[in-house]
Structure formats: C-alpha cells, structure tokens
Image: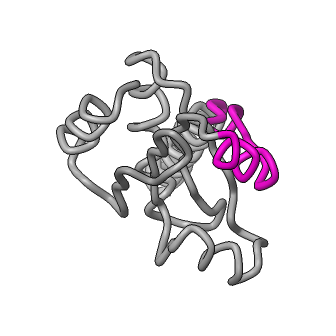
Amino acid sequence: MKKMFLFGGIVIALLIAIFAVSNIEQKEETKTDYYTNKISLDDIRKNIQEKKDQTIYFYQTSCPHCHKVSPIIVPMAKDMNIDMKVIDLENEPKAVWDEFKITGTPTTIHFKEGKEVSRIEGEQPKDEFKKWFTQNKK
C-alpha cells in the first residue's frame, strides 16, 4: 500500500512539473509582440497617394498561419533595416480586402512610388521571405 501511495505521489509530482514547464514556455512565447509597428488604413492610402515606398504586412490576430510567419518575418525585416508596417485585418470589411486584393493572410505587399510592385502570401520557407525582402529593399 505504501508503494502505491509513493508511486501515485511521484506521478502527481511529475504531472505538476510538466504543467508548470509548459505554462512557462507559453508565457515566454506570448511576451514578444510582433505587431507593434502598426499603420492605419488611412496612412496606407495617404502614402499611396503621396507615392511613397512602403512595405505592409497584412495579418489577422486569429490566423494560425500569421502566428507561424510573424516570428520569422517581423524580426527579419527589422534586421534587414526594412520599415515594415503591420495592419490587422481581423475586423475589416471585405471592401478593404478587395481594395488591396488580399485573398488570405498573411500577405506582405511592397509599394514603390505608390504602386504595388511585389507581394508574398501565406506560409513560406524562411529563405523565401529573405529572398523576397532582399529583392524589395528600398
């Protein structure tokens, strides 16, 4: 009987330890906010009208693909000195999606002189994003 209590106590202790470690890992993952360099739709439109160069990352907070891509491309853009702005399309009407021809998220578009010159959509290998950013540096 003592062995069963000892075994049960060990199992419970292990489960508690696993739970604690997984909670710590989840908290560390959520600490980084990849969506701090935000831009409004009005500012995007204004920059297009003024024929400014800009790189915009369109995402949705509920998009699982965005959750995978953001930790790759946001730091990459920063490391490459690209001022990539981000905008959440989560609650935007379909007209906004149509305006920028967004068919899904994540989508990153580079505008040069107010016109779209390139875009990359969906989940891609890290090398593809790096190649795309290199080709679209100002």
The residue shown at (47%, 51%) is 11
Quarter of the image containing the C terminus? top left
Specify whether 116 is left or right of 92. Answer: left
Colouring: one colour
The image shows residue 28 at horizontal and vertical percentages of 59, 31
The stretch in magenta equals 31-50
Closer to the camera in the image, 30 or 60:
60
Closer to the camera in the image, 40 or 7:
40
Specify whether 105 is left or right of 59. Answer: left
Closer to the camera in the image, 102 or 24:
102
Note whether 76 is above or below 8 in the view shown.
Answer: above
Specify whether 83 is left or right of 131. Answer: right
Task: Please tell me in which quadrant of the rendered image residue 34 appears.
Answer: top right
Residue lying furthest bottom: 94
Specify whether 62 is left or right of 103. Answer: right
The image shows residue 4 at horizontal and vertical percentages of 46, 57
As for residue 58 lying within the magenta part, the answer is no
As for residue 34 lying within the magenta part, the answer is yes
Note whether 84 is above or below 107 in the view shown.
Answer: above
The image shows residue 41 at horizontal and vertical percentages of 76, 55
The image shows residue 29 at horizontal and vertical percentages of 56, 37
The residue shown at (69%, 48%) is 49
The residue shown at (46%, 40%) is 112
The residue shown at (58%, 58%) is 59
Number of callouts in the render?
A: 0
Closer to the camera in the image, 7 or 100:
100
